[in-house]
Image (tube, grey):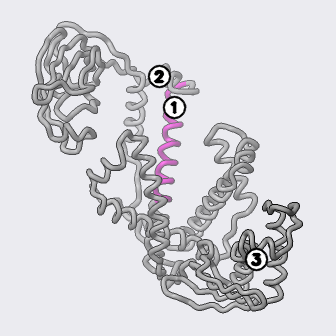
Amino acid sequence: METKIEKLENNMVKVDIEIDADTAEKEYSKACKRLAQRVNIPGFRKGKAPRAILEKNIGSESIKRDVLDSILPSAFSKAITENDLNIITEPYLESYDFELGKPVKVVARMELKPEVKFEQYKDIEVEVEEYKTADNAMQKELDELAEKFTTLNKVEGRESTAKDVVLMDFEGFVDGEAIQGGAAKNYLLDLEHSNFIPGFAEQLVGHKVGEEFTIDVTFPEEYHDEKLNGKPAQFKIKINEIKEKVLPEINDELAKKVGNFKNVDELKADIQKYLENTEKMENEKRSANKVFEAVLSKMTVDVQDSMIEREKQALVADFKQKVAQSGVTWEEVLKRDGADKIDEELKAEALNRIKNSLMMSEIAKLENIQVTAQDLDQKIAEMAALYQTDKDTIFKEIRKNTALIQSLSQQALSQKVTKFLVDNNKIKFIAEAKK
């Protein structure tokens, strides 16, 4: 087999392969025997039809395509290995010249992984805004925990306040017509943490039990129901009950309700550990992001449009799935945000992902960073803990889904490369800018 490689634009190569006539003839004879076993030819038992009869019935071109299907995978593999081609898609058969008694000539195209070059990826100095736990973080965490155990006490003889919860009936109208799904009986609404239309909850303050009244609101311009976008509406309200929120004291009794804590000191110690870990993880994340930015700025790579398009289509599929889960159609999203804007943003995200991936894999290659069995075992243990199961269950899933082991391997490699970059560049923490 003879191979000739010609480099083309956009990280493509043209591969000319020539297979000698004797090999082609032998493979053609094998193909005839294979096909004779599969087809029914009147007057002949399966596998017994002469070659000439077989060619007459199914055509020599069909036999030749079967030959190519059989020999090209190994021919492509040999061409890739011998020429050290780092391909990222399956080879594409462009044309072939197959005449028995003569060498078979095949022309294929292959898309290569872009070449990555670094001006520098170590000993770069980066400035990172240091994340510091707020002075009131402990109290805020305790207050949030206490709020989860809030009780509601029914109150009489006073008007509702902005911190109350009300039990109400409501019915909405736009242009005098009832809003579909815009009515409810005995609906419980927390006036302090309302997710209703802006201005709705605020107008329920200052009313008494039994009071009936009408409020005016305007739907947001980008409301999920297009028919209501920016429309003024009226809601008829009746207050059935007013409930006052009563927060528990932050004491040993609350600590026992929150979790496996003997007293409030143990609870505070656990919160402190959480806050310190959060601070550490946030600074590690910020450091990695700044180092990535710095290394990417010193990296040169020419990413072909076809590669960006494939990654973009993967992002579109993920985006569509999330949109469907939110109850909004893809067409509604395109109309709301603009097809061109979405396409532009997804292309930018696709290019960013590709560059990060290329950076990771190239540094792993340059520094001989590899995923070990211990690394994979650790990832499997983490996955088992996440899904609250055992490692054997995860192993069973991996055996059924080979893509899972590839994903875990990629995660492990990314973590090791990230650690290498953070450890081998100079990080200078500076005060976080006030927002």
Q: Residues within 10 Å of mark 2 (few under 14, many from 20)?
A: many
Q: Is 163 situated left or right of 60 in this image? A: left
Residue at 24% from the left image edge and 21% from the top image edge: 183
Span colored in magenta: 263-285
Callouts 2 and 1 close, C-beta under 8 Å: yes
Residue 114 image offset from top left, x and y in percent: 53, 79
Judging depth in this view, the residue of 174 and 426 nearest the camera is 174
The amino acid marked with disc number 2 is: Leu
Question: Which secondary structure, mark 3?
Answer: helix
Indicate which disc residue 267 carries. 1
Q: Is 250 drawn above or below residue 70 in the view shown? A: above
Q: Which residue is mark 3?
A: 71
Which one is in front in this view, the residue at disc 3 or the one at disc 2? 3
Q: Residue under label 2, please give it.
A: 254
* Residue 20 inside the magenta-drawn segment: no
Whichever of callouts 2 and 1 sits on the residue coming sooner in the sequence is: 2
Query: Could you tell whether 294 is left or right of 1 in the image?
Result: left
Quadrant location, the C terminus: bottom left
What's under tag 3, amino acid-wise?
Ile
Instruction: Answer few, some or many: residues within 10 Å of disc 1's Cα (few below 14, many 20 plus, some between 14 and 19).
Output: many
Q: Are marks 3 and 2 in contact (CB under 8 Å)?
A: no
Q: Main secondary structure of the magenta part?
A: helix
